[in-house]
Amino acid sequence: MAVEEVESELVAVEEAAAYTVKRYPVAPDVRLNVRSGPGTNYRLIKVLPYGASVPINCQTPGETVTGPYGTSNIWDNIANGQFVADAYVRTGSDGYVAIRCA
């Protein structure tokens, strides 16, 4: 393999690592609803299985929800157009742990 190819592969690996999103565990014994927006009035997209963990791409304010980790109006964007209530996700914080969604 040429030096240029190795350098190119290293850059690609470093760039991928820079964009790695941390995953957070959903509360134990919870099958979490995934909604199309930041509230329970939004369409149900799917239900996560027990023991799931989720990436948090960004967070946004929405409907206030009470869950195992308190009461919060923060909703976590876990994929394009998919949101879960932060009160069900163990982030280790009562506030924002990711950027606000645009």
Image: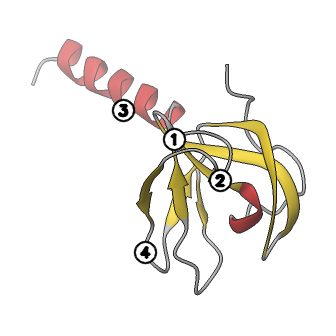
In percent of width and height, residue 27 lies at 65, 76
Name the residue that disc number 4 marks: 49
Residue at 26%, 25% in the rendered image:
9
| Helix, strand or loop at mark 3 | helix
Find the distance from the CA under tag 1 to the CA under tag 2: 9 Å
Type of residue at label 4? Pro
Q: Earlier in the sequence, mark 4 or mark 3?
A: 3
- Pick the quarter of the image with the C terminus: top right
Say whether residue 18 is left or right of residue 66: left
Name the residue that disc number 3 marks: 13
Packing grade of label 2 (10 A; few <14, some 14-19, many >=20) is: some
Q: Earlier in the sequence, mark 1 or mark 4?
A: 1
| Residue 93, disc | none
Residue at 50%, 79% in the rendered image:
51
Q: Earlier in the sequence, mark 2 or mark 3?
A: 3
Find the distance from the CA under tag 2 to the CA under tag 3: 39 Å
- Pick the quarter of the image with the N terminus: top left
In the displayed structure, 39 sits above or below 1; it is below
Q: Earlier in the sequence, mark 1 or mark 3?
A: 3
Find the distance from the CA under tag 1 to the CA under tag 3: 32 Å
In the displayed structure, 10 sits above or below 94; it is above
In contact (CB < 8 Å): disc 1 and disc 3 = no
